[in-house]
Image: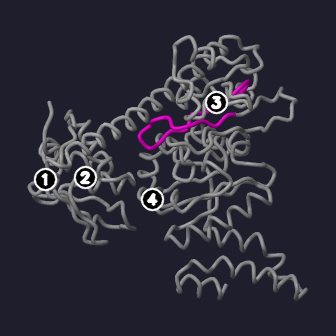
Amino acid sequence: MTFQNPWQEVKDSLDITEVIAEYARVKPAGANYKILCPFHRDKNPSLIISPSKQIWHCFGCGAGGDVFGFVSQYNNISKKEALEMLAKKAGIEIKPTLKPSQGLNNQKTNKEDTRSDKKTISRFEKGSKYLEFVTGIYHKLLLKILKDRSHPVSQYLIKRGLDLDIIKTFQIGYAPRGGVMITLANQNKLDLELLFEIAVLKKTESGEYRDKFSDRLTFPIKDPNSKVVGFTSRVLDYDQTDRPKYLNTAATNWFNKSKIWYGFDLMRVNIRQENKAILVEGNMDVIASYAAGIQYTLASQGTSFTTDQLKILGYTTKNIELAFDNDNAGKLSAKKLFKQASEMGFKVNQVIIPSEFKDLDEYLKSSTFKAENRLKSMPFLEYILSQNLVGLTSKELGMQKQAVVDFLDLLTGLDRLDQEFYNKK
């Protein structure tokens, strides 16, 4: 069924309370409903939903609007994208219409623009379908290999503690040698240039298409709506070549690593329920955490975390715990992220990973963690103080001064009360 005014039709077809209830726990409040506002630090439910008026308003931060405003702000998407998402939920087909101000003289141009837009959308949607197709192929190939437990790939996965349920949950796959994707593409008459655009194929200097991933595990990267947008791939331990350990999808029209969290599609509900997220460096840390029952862990898609990523996460929680690698690079990254996140209003803790373990993945699989069966954390600055007691209490003025300067540098993003508290400490 097609409507000329999709905004109103979608709004009339959905109950705003039911939509918001998919994102947060809704409680009755007389004729209305209330929730903890997801857009600011809210200790008591400040966001009121009015079913009769089909609007919402937060009396804590002042945010408010209709169902499109809530969905767009919560998911960090445009209102047009929110319309498309909710229209699909309501079973309504959206038909492009002319704006009232567009007269007859502009109709030819408008039709041409519409055709151009449709062509762009169609190619984007086709690329998304290709990404899902490729994910399925790699995943099926891995499942087939796993039937032979003596296979080197199977042995690697067993060694890493990845069972079948986890492999299926994350749709982990395997890209073999021999150009399986270019072969399938030719057999099925797929658009090779589009496969190149989504970064599944690469081009040689002579312009020939080749598989980008070869003899690698593949980890599909998904957006918050569980749509595949790219891949991370990893060589196996038996690979003695000088190939890079990880090979990732570069920037495409489908994939922007500065706005994507690995695992967010699976973890978002638990992050909201726990009101915190553990941030790690690698995808394997996310998978290991999930397998250990800690299902509110995320990884960035690069060596650094971006403001856009933190902004997206901030709609779900303002509490983060850092669990980076136990090396100098990990410690420097943690300090950098602490400053960045503190300036954006996040409360930052540090997960305690004993020094004998190189990363969270290794720690979670150890007998030490299994004995505790829980992760411990403490305020990040308290952790830094405990780690720098030698320098801070040194009788050598130079060491003490450097330790104090390094610590004071971390206070720049805090409010005045916190700064005074730690200055006294």
Span of residues in magenta: 213-233
Can residue 218 be found in the magenta stretch?
Answer: yes
Within 10 Å of the Cα at label 2, are there few (<14), some (14-19), or many (20+) other Cα atoms? many
Query: Considering depth in this image, is 310 or 47 the residue closer to the camera?
Result: 310
Residues under numbered marks 1 and 2 in contact, where contact means CB atoms less than 8 Å apart: no
Q: Is residue 131 left or right of residue 202?
A: left
CA separation in Å, label 2 and label 4: 21 Å
Of badges 2 and 4, nearer the viewer stands 2
Residue at 57 percent of width and 49 percent of height: 257
Residue underneath mark 4: 317
Residue at 49 percent of width and 26 percent of height: 130
Residue underneath mark 1: 100
**Secondary structure of residue under mark 1:** loop
Within 10 Å of the Cα at label 1, are there few (<14), some (14-19), or many (20+) other Cα atoms? few
Earlier in the chain: of badge 1 and badge 2, it is 2
Residue at 61 percent of width and 38 percent of height: 287
Residues under numbered marks 2 and 3 in contact, where contact means CB atoms less than 8 Å apart: no
CA separation in Å, label 1 and label 2: 22 Å
SS assignment for the magenta stretch, majority: strand
Depicted 196 relative to depicted 345: above or below: above
Within 10 Å of the Cα at label 3, are there few (<14), some (14-19), or many (20+) other Cα atoms? many
- Give amino acid for label 1: Pro
Residue underneath mark 3: 218
CA separation in Å, label 1 and label 3: 49 Å
